[in-house]
Image: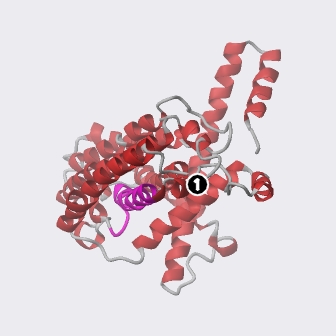
Amino acid sequence: MQDFTFVTKWIHTGLTTYIPEWLAVTFECLAIGVALLLAYALLALFYIWFERKVCAYFQCRLGPNRVGTCGVLQPFADMFKILIKELIDLKHTDKFLFALAPYLVILASMLAFSVLPWGNGMQVLDFNVGIFFLLAVSSIGVLGILLAGWSSNNKFTLIGALRSGAQMVSYEISIGLSVITMIVLAGTMSVSGIVNEQNHLWFLFSGHVPAIIAFVIYLIAGTAETNRGPFDLPEAESELTAGYHTEYSGIHFGFFYLAEYLNLFIVAGVASLLFLGGWMPFHIPGWDSFNAVMDYIPGIVWFLGKAVVISFIIIWFKWTFPRLRIDQLLTLEWKYLMPISLFNLVLMVLTVTFGWYL
């Protein structure tokens, strides 16, 4: 299994040979920041193209096919178009909060993105409460959405923001309970620790019924948390024009757009981390030769592959099921998902206590 730690140590040793350590650390932090921003932008553009292609396939269309091979450059053209659009200055709005909202949304997305483990040793932030940190920073995004809806001085944006606030706060409970359920099985809140605990077998298989229930609940709640169909009530085009970002244009609208797709990747990445071993290869206990072959596949390929597959499932939800009403959406959470999540947490505690897992 590839370990990227020796590469980072080699780079740090090489830099400190020629420059002071404080300058080397500063340079490394800047390089990591640039790499994160680049990966963030490229992944968001890939997901935009990916969803448009999947949607086209479901609707018997071709999708983007003009700019570049199979339309792969279409998102870049769209991004360039958004960047040159004018930032419209609206009257009777809270200008400071109106400008602050998209940066809060993108900040929350970036902080959560930095916690994801790309491979063995390929992680920006890794400490003993990594999952708790991820849940905490991902909750900042709802503040940006509420500020965007309220500061725009528009009834459509306000209704969209209130819907989004109620929806995200509600479904965060089920996501948190599903995450805690898997933490009970892992015995640690460290992101790298959770991955390493799945060395012999992924938690989705070793955790038996409680892990499967937690996985299904996490997928449903994660889809709602990212405001994607059939839970896209905050942006319901037929009712609210564009929801909470109706009044935004230019790069500010682009921030909301990028954050939405990166949140999809983050939800899929966390599902990969908790249930499918993150960058850990697929191992079957007792099949040593098979496991050795799987170890040759780089960890980053495993992580991205799992995240893309889970993202496809979430996109599949959107283009298959009709949009729910707001009362149906909240009923699903408070009457069904949350009680089942609580019961499943107790079931996982019993499973771990009596050693009923593999």
- Picture layout, residue 195 above or below residue 167: above
Which residue shows up at 59% across the image and 34% down it?
Answer: 124
Count of numbered labels shown in the rendering: 1
Q: Is residue 169 rendered to the left or right of residue 67?
A: left
Q: Residues within 10 Å of mark 1 (few under 14, many from 20)?
A: some
Structure colour scheme: secondary structure
Q: Is residue 122 rendered to the left or right of residue 245?
A: right
Amino acid at dot 1 = Leu
Q: Magenta stretch?
A: 209-230
Q: Is residue 92 rendered to the left or right of residue 267?
A: left
- Helix, strand or loop for the magenta stretch, by majority: helix
Percent x, y of residue 1: 76, 45
Percent x, y of residue 257: 44, 56
SS of the residue under disc 1: helix
> Can the viewer see residue 102 in this picture?
no
Q: Of all residues shown, which one is farthest toward the bottom? A: 60
Which residue shows up at 68% across the image and 36% down it?
Answer: 121
Percent x, y of residue 114: 54, 39
Q: Is residue 41 magenta?
A: no
Which residue shows up at 68% across the image and 27% down it?
Answer: 28
